[in-house]
Image: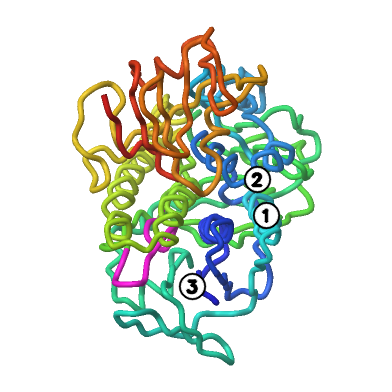
Amino acid sequence: MTEVLIAGAGPTGLTLAIDLARRGVGVRIVEKTETFFEGSRGDGLQPRTLEVFEDLGVLDAVLAAGMPPVPMKIHLGGEVVGERMMAELAEPTPEVPYPNGFFLGQSRTEGILRDRLAEFGVRVEVGTPLLGFEQDADGVTAELPGERIRVRYLVGADGGKSFVRKALGIAFEGTTDESIRMLLGDVQAEGLDRAYGHWFAKPENPMSGIGLTPLPGVPHFQFGAPLGEEEVEASLATLQSRLDELSGGGIRLHDLAWSTVWRPNIRLAERFREGRVFLAGDAAHVHPPTGGQGLNTGVQDAYNLGWKLADGSLELLDSYEPERRGNAARVLKISTEILEKYKEGADDAHERGENTRQLDIGYRGGPLAPEATGRIRPGDRAPDAPLKDANGKSVRLFELMRGPRPTVLVFGDGPAPEGARRILPAGSALSDVDFEDVGGHAFAAYEAGNGRQVSIRPDGYIRGLTA
């Protein structure tokens, strides 16, 4: 039986479908286009998204297909004048196993997610637009080509032009800045070193230029160049002429795989839910690409919503909008501030800080996070930590949390509810269900004294702490 219908098979819809399918929830995911998108588009994966992908069972495939950040060579007036990194690379810590962003073209990320979804027996139904829907107190009746189906919930993950959002009459508040346009594409570049990204600009205006970033697994670079007000065709010839203006020539572009003229939309849906119908990803918020937040925020929407739909309780369903809309507004502000730096030609426009990595996203003060004191509180991301089991095997705390169920941790020798995971100090005698805190990192991360209990939501955020 189909319990949830998802309209839209981008990263948001696919993440949600995987999360539901692994919980045994009957799900269908439909996509109006006849073929899957091919292109890089959202190619930056933030550290928190890597943690989500680990839980969903796709991280190894993503890491094998993608690549870490590479330095950017700066070309001014046809001469290489230096290198820079967009963000200083950090070393993994016990609490944060993936501290840096990662790069993989969006279409390849989607392919990995589709393969994972197929392992649960669910496939994307292409060429299947959602034609209409009606809802009542008990469910949603959706119209698809040649059939009407009855489901408990409908999720619109169908992009910035969302049919679902428009059918609900939900305002999409914000702006489209017609003064800014970008020429984007995936293209091969003869003569450029693929161990680097490349920035081409004039010496008198070094912050206004063209970027070419190598894409993993394919011989293409992602091309990005600002446009003036003139109308241009997103063709190979246009890309080549723009590059020649700033590089002085000598670099031949060829085999254009995808291209578009992009305008920055900065919009946030007035509501993320109406009854049994939910919005997620670009259907709920659209971002400028500055900061690499859009795809990642959509993945977080889906990860937040999946366990709540599976449970179906009003308390959890009612928490989706206040938790995710507030975070979407915050992330939109970050993306917009970075965009403004580009417009102003600020020297630090290319720099990326902790606020873009999405590790600081949390739900303190939300409907599922009771008030508390301390460094770590309900609503915070649950940190990782190294452990050992009774056989001396190394285990990460994230491994104990992996899967579709909530997790309860008990520190020390206090009473433990059934199914809880007990963590003991180093040197303790361990039973088959106990784990040793290697280096004291788990006790420290959770500010744990003997007997502290920590309940962790299925999406990896703390729901409650005792003692």
Along the line of sight, the residue nearer the viewer: 299 or 250: 299
Q: Earlier in the sequence, mark 2 or mark 3?
A: 3
Q: Earlier in the sequence, mark 2 or mark 1?
A: 2
Figure check: 338 above or below 308: above
Measure the C-alpha gap from mark 2 to mark 3.
Answer: 24 Å
Residue type for callout 2: Val
Residue at 79% across / 43% down in the picture? 219
Residue type for callout 1: Arg
Residue at 44% across / 68% down in the picture? 156
Instruction: Give the labeled residue for mark 1.
Output: 116
Instruction: Give the labeled residue for mark 3.
Output: 3
Residue at 46% across / 78% down in the picture? 151
The label number, if any, that marks residue 58 in the structure image: 2
Q: Which residues are magenta?
A: 273-286
Contact, mark 2 vs mark 1 (Cβ under 8 Å): yes
Along the line of sight, the residue nearer the viewer: 331 or 52: 52
The quarter holding residue 215 reads top right
| Residue 89 image point, x, y percent | 55, 20
